Image (cartoon, rainbow, N blue to C red):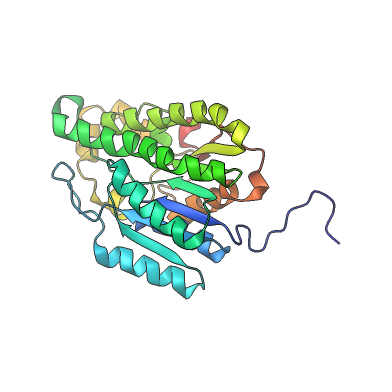
């Protein structure tokens, strides 16, 4: 017999509905599949369009379609569509369609993001604006369109993808660092403001994650070569260079589940000790 107050481990988000941005591939897809494995239905959105300011391709429609097939193969339902997190109207349209079909919203994962590498004096206005608009304003937009549904549902969990760059000052990533620090401010404020509605707001902070985005970043070694003293900033304490998307998804699942029912305003690191150096 289960002890009083204990929580079941199987189907840890069974019957819940999660809204995930940047869901077509990478961390977003990993989160969608991990939550589907544990019983959640998925509402998914992804930009499906490249940025002129970013040196690697974004996910394509085929990626979004494949993610949907993988969710369905797990016996869960999914509603997915193209949408840019910089546009509240697009996000609201996808979310409203999903809630119309599933009837509720319990979990929000504001995950969509982009990244570039350059010295501070090579940051163009386009790079700055695209990074801040996507990684910071996009998170705000995601929560703005989602929070009324969480309130109507009697509560829920908001999980925001930040980074080790949201805790420490990584050189050569200044727009990204600015946005990821800003995300923490959003989470802290809303963790207080939405607490009366039983909505929890937390951030996850991975080190480098093995995804198409990390593989698409080039030029960092050359930049570090200009000032080798900066190299150790990027090193993890634990003997691993990068973490897997699944490692982040395990943390996301915990924050999405009732196992973390009193956890809010947390900066959860999955960084191999990067931020304690």
Can residue 6 be seen from the camera position used here? yes
Eyeballing the image, is 230 above or below 111? above
Q: Position of residue 129 (x, y in %)?
A: 21, 32
| Residue appearing at x 42%, y 52% in the figure | 20
Left or right: 106 in relation to 129: right
Which residue is more in the foreground, 27 or 153? 153
Q: Position of residue 92 (x, y in %)?
A: 36, 47
Which residue is more in the foreground, 153 or 66? 153
Left or right: 254 in relation to 42: right
Quarter of the figure with the N terminus: bottom right
Eyeballing the image, is 99 above or below 220? below
Residue 174: image quadrant is top left
Q: Position of residue 90 (x, y in %)?
A: 29, 48
Which residue is more in the foreground, 254 or 196? 196
| Residue appearing at x 44%, y 26% in the figure | 185
Eyeballing the image, is 191 above or below 147? above
Tally of numbered tags: 0
| Residue appearing at x 32%, y 41% in the figure | 88
Can residue 238 be seen from the camera position used here? no
Residue 89: image quadrant is top left
Q: Position of residue 123 (x, y in %)?
A: 17, 29
């Amino acid at each position: 017999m289960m002890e009083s107050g204990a929580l079941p481990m199987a189907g840890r988000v069974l019957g819940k509905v999660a809204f995930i941005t940047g869901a077509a591939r990478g961390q977003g897809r990993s989160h969608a599949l991990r939550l589907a494995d544990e019983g959640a239905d998925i509402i998914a959105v992804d930009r499906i369009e490249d940025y002129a300011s970013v040196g690697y391709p974004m996910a394509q429609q085929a990626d979004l379609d494949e993610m949907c097939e993988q969710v369905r193969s797990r016996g869960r339902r999914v509603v997915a569509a193209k949408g840019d997190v910089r546009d509240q109207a697009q996000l609201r349209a996808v979310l409203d369609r999903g809630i119309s079909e599933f009837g509720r919203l319990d979990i929000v994962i504001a995950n969509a993001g982009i990244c570039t590498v350059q010295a501070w004096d090579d940051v163009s206005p386009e790079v700055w604006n695209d990074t801040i608009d996507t990684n910071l304003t996009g998170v705000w937009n995601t929560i703005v369109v989602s929070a009324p549904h969480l309130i109507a549902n009697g509560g829920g969990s908001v999980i925001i993808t930040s980074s080790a760059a949201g805790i420490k000052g990584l050189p050569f990533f200044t727009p990204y660092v600015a946005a990821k620090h800003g995300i923490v401010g959003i989470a802290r404020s809303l963790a207080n403001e939405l607490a009366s509605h039983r909505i929890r707001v937390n951030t996850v902070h991975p080190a480098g994650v093995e995804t198409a985005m990390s593989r698409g970043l080039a030029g960092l070694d050359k930049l570090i070569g200009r000032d080798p003293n900066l190299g150790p900033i990027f090193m993890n304490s634990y003997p691993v260079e990068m973490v897997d998307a699944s490692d982040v998804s395990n943390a996301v699942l915990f924050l999405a589940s009732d196992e973390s029912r009193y956890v809010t305003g947390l900066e959860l690191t999955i960084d191999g000790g990067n931020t304690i150096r």
